[in-house]
Amino acid sequence: MTARARSVFILDDEQPLCEDLCELISAAGHSARWCTDPRKLNMSELASVDVVLLDLGLPAMDGIDIMNRLTAFAEPPRLIFISGVGEDVLRVVAQVAGEQKLIVLGALTKPLDPQQLLRLLDYADCGAVAEAVPRRGRRAILPALKASLAAGSLPVSFQPKVEVQTLRFAGAEALLTGVLPGVGPVSPVDIVAAATSDPSVLVHLTQYVLGIAARGCAQWIKAGWRGPISVNLPLEVVLQPDSLRNLIQTVEDAQLSPADVIFELTEDSLYDSCAESMSMLARLRMAGFGLALDDVGRRQSGLLQLSALPVTEIKIDLQIVRDARTWTKARNIFASIAELGRKLGVKVVAEGVEFPDDLKLARTFPIDYVQGYLISPKRPLPELLRALSAQAGSEAAGVEWNTGA
């Protein structure tokens, strides 16, 4: 994942700092320019650079004003904040930038750590930031989704999950690819949202993905690799009549047992969950399915419900992992969730592991598994099986993932 050379523009009112940063950045193989007074800057100059190092406390025009102007660009540069203000202020500004669809690589407090700056400039061109996918309305998606499900043409991919220390294959998660036949690129979030508007389509979609996922899992088990398949399970589907029987039947049709399947439920889906839904979760566990609480840390409700839920696994939200690269509080939250999982006796998965430092962080705490672009992007099943078989087709062998570790 070696990054290419970056073009950098430094906006800071301290000329000696700008000169030192230019020298540092250039010596690392990147190019750099600087300006101490944004009033003398033609903002169009920033449209052609990869990264802007932005001092939030510019006297003539503060960094938030600069951010607001960058939103007018079709492809705004990435941002690295530099400031003497506290971490809490930097984090709020970073959140505002994210809501404006600006990409923040990190924030540096003065005096700057040169190596930390160079690490931020060494971001990958893919993986850390999701590809832009056109947003489409439900009216455009729903008919195409129904047709694709009926034809069995909706593509499903698999993202490996690996043991944190050895990187040994430990299963995979089944995911929509973001392509809808007859429409083209569509965000998986939009596909699920469209399906949710029609309960029968949501059930069909869930059973469809589960069927493909279970058959894929059966193939890697037959090839000698152990590890369950994880599938997202909307709570609305769980509450449908005969849902448990249908889920078991789909899994058994693939020659799997429920113990080979982990259903992932989000914090939001369990927020204010009713007695009926809690009963169904208990029944899923009694049938032998694993249950994972996904996106843990996104909202407090999930942590509060952990003691009452029959989960076997918790997945730390990828945004927590991303924030932990920069923010001390996020790293503390990450550590707390990992330790909580250990004390509760459930497996802990860190999602969104995209850089070597993310893996290093996960190995520092009681994390069991990692998942993310550093290990592998989501892949079609044949590609995943080839990656496994290339490693002697034995559970005893590790797999050479993207990390090279």
Image: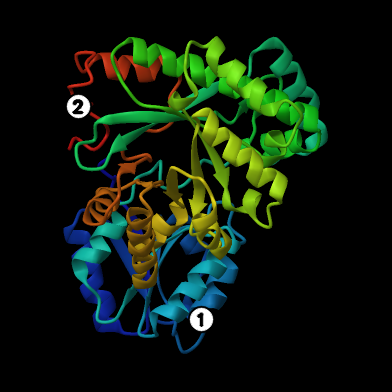
Image coords of residue 278 (percent x, y) = 64, 46
Between discs 1 and 2, the one toward the N terminus: 1
Q: Is the N terminus in the top left, top right, bottom left or bottom right quadrant? A: top left
Image coords of residue 334 (percent x, y) = 37, 61
Most extreme residue toward the front is 286
Quarter of the image for residue 197 reads top right
Point out which mark residue 325 bears.
none
Residue type highlighted by circle 2:
Gly
Task: Indicate which label's residue lies in the foreground, 1 or 2.
Answer: 2
Q: CA distance from mark 1 to mark 2?
A: 56 Å
Secondary structure state at the residue bearing disc 1: helix
Crowd class of label 2 (few under 14; some 14 to 19; many from 20; radius 10 Å): some
Residue 325 seen anywhere in this rendered image of the structure: no
| Pick the front one: 105 or 227 | 227
At horizontal 68% and vertical 52% (from top left) the residue drawn is: 273
Residue 126 seen anywhere in this rendered image of the structure: yes
| Pick the front one: 87 or 15 | 87
| Pick the front one: 61 or 201 | 201
At horizontal 44% and vertical 47% (from top left) the residue drawn is: 315
Q: Is the C terminus in the top left, top right, bottom left or bottom right quadrant? A: top left
From the viewer's perspective, is 276 left or right of 175? Answer: right
Q: Does 111 sit above or below residue 148?
A: below
The number of numbered badges drawn on the structure is 2
From the viewer's perspective, is 74 left or right of 164? Answer: right
| Pick the front one: 163 or 89 | 163
Residue type highlighted by circle 1:
Arg
Crowd class of label 1 (few under 14; some 14 to 19; many from 20; radius 10 Å): few
The residue that disc 2 covers is 398
Point out which mark residue 39 bears.
1
Q: Does 150 sit above or below residue 292?
A: above
